[in-house]
Amino acid sequence: MKQAVLVVDVQPCFDPPSWLVERSRLLAAKFPSIATVIRHDEAKVPFFRQLGWKPRSIDDSLVQADKIVLKYGYGLPSDVIEQFQIWNVDRVLVCGIQADTCVLAAGFALFDAGLQPTIVADTVVGSSLDRSGKLGVDLWRHHFGQVVNNHLELL
């Protein structure tokens, strides 16, 4: 089974813990990898109008990946799916910020594309609703079934 890594929104504006950045870097270095970076453009996604909050207009990934893809909302850009298909990936290992929102949204997009989304439970944090990420991992297990509990199992 060919595997790749998707690093979701591990960037300064979300103030990720150092352990998350380090674990994500280890996985991205071991497998073909894509990192997403969320940017703000109110004309594309009305974060401020609807939520009173917005990500930075310019922010960069804290994880070096084979490919960096910009996104403007919760969803996963089609460029990500296309790249995984070009790489002939079967399983996508997912880590990142907001396990219960952006990471989960990525899981749905990967699943709908026929890939096997697999969350790496010790490489995610949740939103302000559940910073531990447990809610996101539980939702992932319910919807996709594929959970790796410890990133060391993959190294």
Image: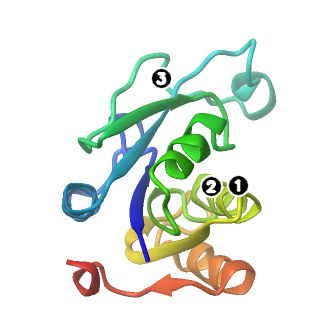
Numbered label attached to residue 56: 3
Residue type beneath disc 2 = Ala
In space, the residues marked 1 and 3 are separated at their CA atoms by 24 Å
Query: Mark 1 — residue?
Result: 109
Category of crowding for the residue at label 1, using alpha-carbon neighbours closer than 10 angstroms: few (below 14), some (14–19), many (at least 20): some
Residue type beneath disc 3 = Arg
Q: Give the mark nearest the N terminus, 2 or 3.
A: 3
Q: In which quadrant will I find the C terminus? A: bottom left
SS class, disc 2:
helix
Q: Are marks 1 and 2 in contact (CB under 8 Å)?
A: yes
Residue type beneath disc 1 = Ala
Numbered label attached to residue 106: 2
| Nearest to viewer (mark 2 / mark 3) | 2
Q: Residue at x 63, y 28 (%)?
A: 72
Q: Quadrant of residue 110?
A: bottom right
Residue 1, given in percent of the width and then of the height, sits at 44, 77
Q: Quadrant of residue 138?
A: bottom right
Residue 89, given in percent of the width and then of the height, sits at 49, 61
Q: Are marks 1 and 3 in contact (CB under 8 Å)?
A: no
Category of crowding for the residue at label 2, using alpha-carbon neighbours closer than 10 angstroms: few (below 14), some (14–19), many (at least 20): many
Compared to 152, does 37 lie above or below?
above
Residue 35, given in percent of the width and then of the height, sits at 40, 43
Residue 90, given in percent of the width and then of the height, sits at 52, 69
